Image (tube, rainbow, N blue to C red):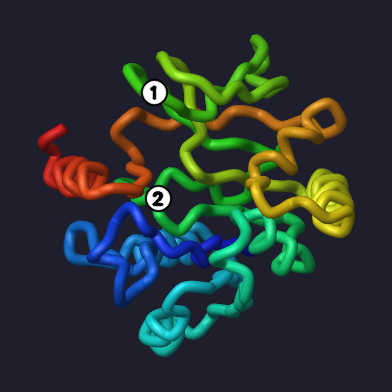
Amino acid sequence: MNAVIMAAGTGTRLRPLTDDRPKGMVEVGGMPIVERQIRNFLETGVAEIVIVTGHKAERFAPLAAKYGRLTFVHNPLYEACNNIYSMYLARAYLGESYVSEADVVMHRNYLLPRPETSMLYGGYRRGFAKEWILRFDGRRRIHRVDVMGGEGVILAGLSYWTAPDAQVVRERLEALVEAGGFETLFWDDVYMSCLDRVPVFLREIGPDDWTEVDTADDLTRAEAREKGNV
């Protein structure tokens, strides 16, 4: 079991904090966001962690020296493409894999040691303007993802893929990228187009278990959740 962390983006909405570092290296509770993920993955039994870098890639060097079991893949198109290309470059590692976005603060370790099915992690939120809302049946199998505002169980920036399901998703990923015109697509668009062929289930976490840090307001919320004030 491994983990792929997508950490190539420029984090423009979090400037000036991201002028000299990747968004994943911004600290919450005195620790870089990505380092918290690394610790949780290792604690859960993940054998290898792959980090896809881009903006200010050299700033991850201290983590490599500290933890050792890190593999880096560099995305030279991080300014021109969304994160679909990061996953394309790391596709050889996809199989019995966690896939995480580097800007997600895990306020507790909610990872499963070895999931039996492919899963999308999500939690209930309300009052949002635009999010990826998971639609699922009574068995919690996800059949659709809607991008809209309102309330519901939304993506928490983390998924897990079994080896057979990862092969299907990887083939779809390769087809989309190699056809061209993929620059505006996200990694999420890839697996969402496979939901009719792969059984993906919801792993629900609490609304305060994670924070996706895109803006200064998100960072304030993340710090508050760390202190138990939200």
Alpha-carbon distance for marks 1 and 2? 19 Å
In-image side of 104 versus 78 (left or right)? left
In-image side of 132 versus 215 (left or right)? right
Three-letter code for the amino acid on which mark 1 is drawn: Ala
Residue 43 picture location, percent across and down: 44, 62
What number of labels is visible? Answer: 2
Residue 152 picture location, percent across and down: 45, 16
Residue projecting furthest to the bottom: 65
Q: Is residue 28 above or below residue 135?
A: below
Q: Which residue is mark 1?
A: 129
Q: Is residue 195 above or below residue 76?
A: above
Give the class, few, some or many, for how many residues have Cα within 10 Å of label 1's Cα (few <14, many ≥20). Answer: few
Q: Is residue 133 above or below residue 40?
A: above
Q: Is residue 56 above or below residue 123?
A: below
In-image side of 168 versus 20 (left or right)? right
Residue at 44% from the left image edge and 66% from the top image edge: 38
Three-letter code for the amino acid on which mark 2 is drawn: Val
Q: Secondary structure at mark 2?
A: strand
Residue nearest the viewer, comparing 192 with 3: 192
Residue 53 picture location, percent across and down: 53, 73
Q: Quadrant of the N terminus?
A: bottom right
Residue at 32% from the left image edge and 18% from the top image edge: 127
Labelled disc at residue 104: 2
Residue nearest the viewer, comparing 30 with 89: 89
